[in-house]
Image (cartoon, rainbow, N blue to C red):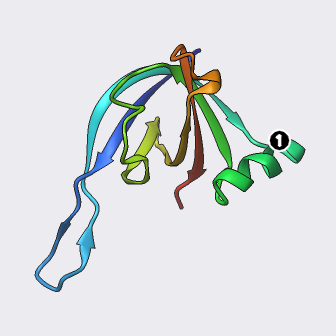
Amino acid sequence: MRQRIEVQTDIGTQDSYGQTTHDWTTDICLRAKIETLRGAEGELARQIYPHATHRVTTEYHTDLNSTGATRRRVKFGTRALHIGAIINPDEESFHLELLCGEER
């Protein structure tokens, strides 16, 4: 795992007009492998999370495996990937796979 990522949580607030503003805070810094989903692999991933464009594999972290995935994102460099699903393969708690969609 060669990329350094930050897992961030949206602690958004409402402005005076009632609109939600997105304020991100970094919860965890990890090493990860980031892969673009293509072909059949991408189609299978999109059955779990329809907007999946990337799979992020990282070491297991209890805080990351908790609920609230929909309010989190992976930040690496200037790019941000919204976390749509967190998968613990074989329930071994060795590593996690995050299905993510790139924020636009």
Q: Is residue 32 visible?
A: no
The residue sitting at 25% across, 72% down in the picture is 20
Mark 1 = which residue?
41
Q: Quadrant of residue 91?
A: top right
Give the residue type that dot 1 points to: Glu
Query: Which residue is pictured at 67% across the width and 51% down the height?
Result: 48
Element assignment for label 1: helix
**Crowding at label 1, few (<14), some or many (≥20) Cα neighbours within 10 Å?**
few
* Percent coordinates x, y for residue 26 in the rendering: 28, 36
Q: Is residue 13 left or right of residue 64?
A: left
Residue closest to the eye, 104 or 62: 62
Q: Quadrant of residue 94 in the image?
A: top right
Q: Quadrant of the N terminus?
A: top right
Q: Residue furthest left?
A: 16
- Residue under the point 89% across and 45% down: 40
Q: Position of residue 44 (x, y in %)?
A: 79, 47
Left/right of residue 77 with respect to residue 9 in the rendered view: right
In the image, residue 46 sits, relative to residue 54, either above or below, namely below
